[in-house]
Amino acid sequence: MRRIALFAALVMTIALPARADKDCKRMQIQVTVLQGQIADWQRKAADNLTELRRLTELVAEQNALLKNALDEGSQQDEAVLTSMRDLGDSVSEVMERLEALRMAGNVATPVAAGAGLSATDPGGVVDPNTGEIVAPVPAPRELYTQAYADYARGNYDLAIQGFIEYMSHYPETDFTDNAQYWIGWCLYGKKEYAEAIEAWNTLFRNFPSSDKLPDGRVKKGMALERLGRRSQALVEYRYVVDRYPTSPAARIARQRLNP
């Protein structure tokens, strides 16, 4: 019996390292699988955030169009109600997606600008003139979308600041002319009609091939009317009808020519 016990102990002593080695290999495989799952999760999170930004911009655009329709009275009641329903659907879609992302843990809580900056981990860039660490410039889509959202909410001063910052950092993108156009809209919303006209004149001068020219011309005419300069406004409307006869702006211009 003693010999049998000693033999069993010897077998266990030899078997334990082999079993431990198998356990280690099994754990390594599990870690590798988990790392792959984490990588997939991160990719999905990035895709979801991109889609969320797109939906947010869509809601901001629809909100702006609705505000314009109500302000100018250029749409019929049924069209306004349809826009309101579309806006409500888009808002619901964004809120549902945002809630789903938060529940899945894919959306991080926003942090205040400049948070986490330190001498050892600045998270920014060095200003060559002052040598000071400054916050990095936001991505163009992020900067433009935020400015547009401020405009849609009626935060005109913030929107103007955002659009100017966008044009300063990104002077030659497909949305630079749009930013100049919306600056005019913001000033118009503030009832600063002379300044709005100047903003649209800058659009015409600096971006002669912009697809915002017809709308800018019509809006300039509206601003001129607000200043009591009806004859000059008619010149803008006729220009749009003659130069861009099939554009949506031409339809509004015709309505303005024949109220």
Image (cartoon, rainbow, N blue to C red):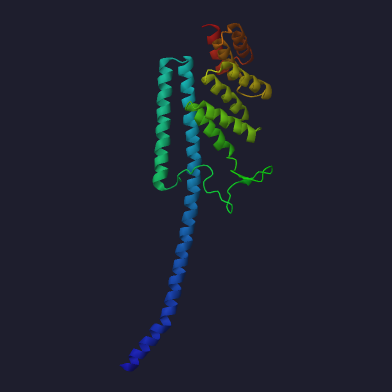
**Residue shown at 33% from the left, 91% from the top:** 4
**Residue shown at 60% from the left, 30% from the top:** 164
- The answer to whether one can see residue 173 in this image is no
Q: In screen coordinates, is 121 left or right of 23?
A: right
**Residue shown at 52% from the left, 34% from the top:** 146
Q: Which residue ends up furthest to the left in the rendered image?
A: 1
- The mark tally for this picture is 0
User: Is residue 205 positioned above or below 241 on the image?
Assistant: below
Quadrant containing the N terminus in the rendered view:
bottom left
In the picture, residue 245 is in which quadrant?
Answer: top right
Give percent across and percent down for residue 244: 61, 16
In the picture, residue 181 is in which quadrant?
Answer: top right
In the picture, residue 90 is in which quadrant?
Answer: top left
- The answer to whether one can see residue 29 in this image is yes
**Residue shown at 58% from the left, 12% from the top:** 224
User: Is residue 111 positioned above or below 31 on the image?
Assistant: above
Give percent across and percent down for residue 138: 57, 40
User: Is residue 181 positioned above or below 123 on the image?
Assistant: above
Give percent across and percent down for residue 192: 55, 18
User: Is residue 84 positioned above or below 25 on the image?
Assistant: above
Q: Nearer the viewer, residue 96 or 3?
A: 96
